[in-house]
Amino acid sequence: MYVDEKQQIEERQELQQERSTKQKPGSGHTDWKAWGAGLGLTILLGLIAFLLALLPGLATVGSLTIALILGLAWRAIVGLPATLTGGVRFSAQKVLRYGIILTGVRLNFQLIAASGLQVLLLDVLLILFGLLVLPKLAHKLGLSRHLSFLLGVGQSICGASAVGAVSALLRGADEEETSLAVAICGLVGTIGVLLFTFAAPLLHLHGHIYGLLSGSTLHEIAQVVAAGPVGGVGAADMAMVVKLTRVMLLAPVALFLAFFLAFKEGKQDGASGSVNWKNIPIPWFVFGFLAVGAINSFGWLPKDVSNIVVQISVFLMVMAMAAMGLMVDLSVIRRTGLKALGIAVLSFFIFVGVSSCLLFVLHLAA
């Protein structure tokens, strides 16, 4: 009798263990369907955002911000079942990295090199200011350290792409703060496009200066594309070169940050500042980003193929933004969103002011 009871207990334990194994993502048919449903939801929202961004009124907002808003709205109205979390998280993390890699097809190292060291120096100085000064200001004004730093990264480099890349390196980074930073960068960048569009005729900005200012301060490539033509053809080209130089600098910034964080962690663990090389969260997708940029720069991709890759990269990023929106609890945005948005707008105006000063210091305004 005792043996039978013991055998029944063991059978129940084995059954429970089998069920728990099936609950892991991808380990059973039911879970694969749930995982695929979560991924499919981000694809659906991404397609809707992609189409909405083609409308004239929403073109300046951009598909990335629209996708994030759609994700937030879906989570608030419909909700997100726990079974779909695996596929949604895959989009928010893995698909985001694939999108960043393919974004490298926009780079043209030869064009960037031809623009001269002054443009490179302008972007380097602005990024240093955005990473060292703006986060301290935002933190003193009441934002958390992580959110402050992510907003600084998005402002100084390339918006959502930079926020997603850097947040992957920050241990303990809050997914909700990451999504909030992405949303705010999209909104502030859109405000920036409108300001540049209306300010250029009023201030009589020279096309060269307008291109430098818009390219060095707006968050997303799409925003630079939207705002650039206001200053003329030459201004649009200059703005894109300046912006692509900032995008290129995402790679060294991410690599430096990975090593710096590993060094800091080793120092806190009492290892006299020694680095545990095995634990460095090296952002391998950044090397892919540079590799794709090199392939495009050498002209190894036909123009038609390059355009297709650009569209694929944009859609993958849009999927990732939709996923980030789905992962966010709106109560977080209600608590800190308006305050963070106000601080981000203030940071943008400060950034524009610093960029204007640097144009004269570096003799780029001539």
Image (cartoon, grey):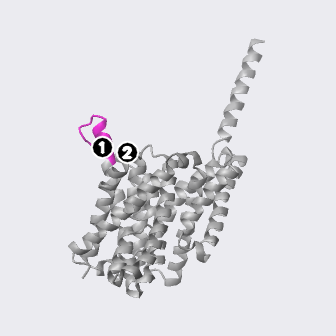
Q: Which residue has dot 2 on it?
A: 279
Residue 130, placed above or below residue 366: above
Nearest to the observer: residue 93 or residue 356:
356
Nearest to the observer: residue 1 or residue 159:
159
What residue sits 66% from the left and 32% below the top?
17
Q: Tell me the amino acid under the disc marked 2.
A: Asn
Identify the element where label 2 is drawn. helix
Residue 266 part of the magenta-drawn span: yes
Q: For the residues marked 1 and 2, what is the alpha-carbon distance in whole angstroms? A: 12 Å
Identify the element where label 1 is drawn. helix
For label 1, the crowd category at 10 Å Cα-Cα, with few meaning under 14, some 14 to 19 and many 20 or more, is: some
Q: Which mark is nearer the camera, 1 or 2? A: 1
Quadrant of image for the N terminus: top right
For label 2, the crowd category at 10 Å Cα-Cα, with few meaning under 14, some 14 to 19 and many 20 or more, is: few
What residue sits 40% from the left and 45% below the top?
142
Q: Let me know if residue 221 appears in the view.
A: no
Q: Which residue has dot 1 on it?
A: 264
Does residue 56 appear to the left or right of 268 in the view shown?
right
Percent x, y for residue 361?
21, 72
Q: Quadrant of residue 13?
A: top right
Q: Let me know if residue 148 appears in the view.
A: yes
Q: Residue furthest top?
A: 1
Q: Tell me the amino acid under the disc marked 1.
A: Lys
What residue sits 53% from the left and 73% below the top?
60
Percent x, y for residue 48?
66, 67
User: Disc 1 or 2, which lies upstream in sequence?
Assistant: 1
Percent x, y for residue 285?
44, 60
Nearest to the observer: residue 195 or residue 172:
195
Q: Over which residues does the magenta segment extend?
A: 261-276
Q: Residue furthest bottom?
A: 233
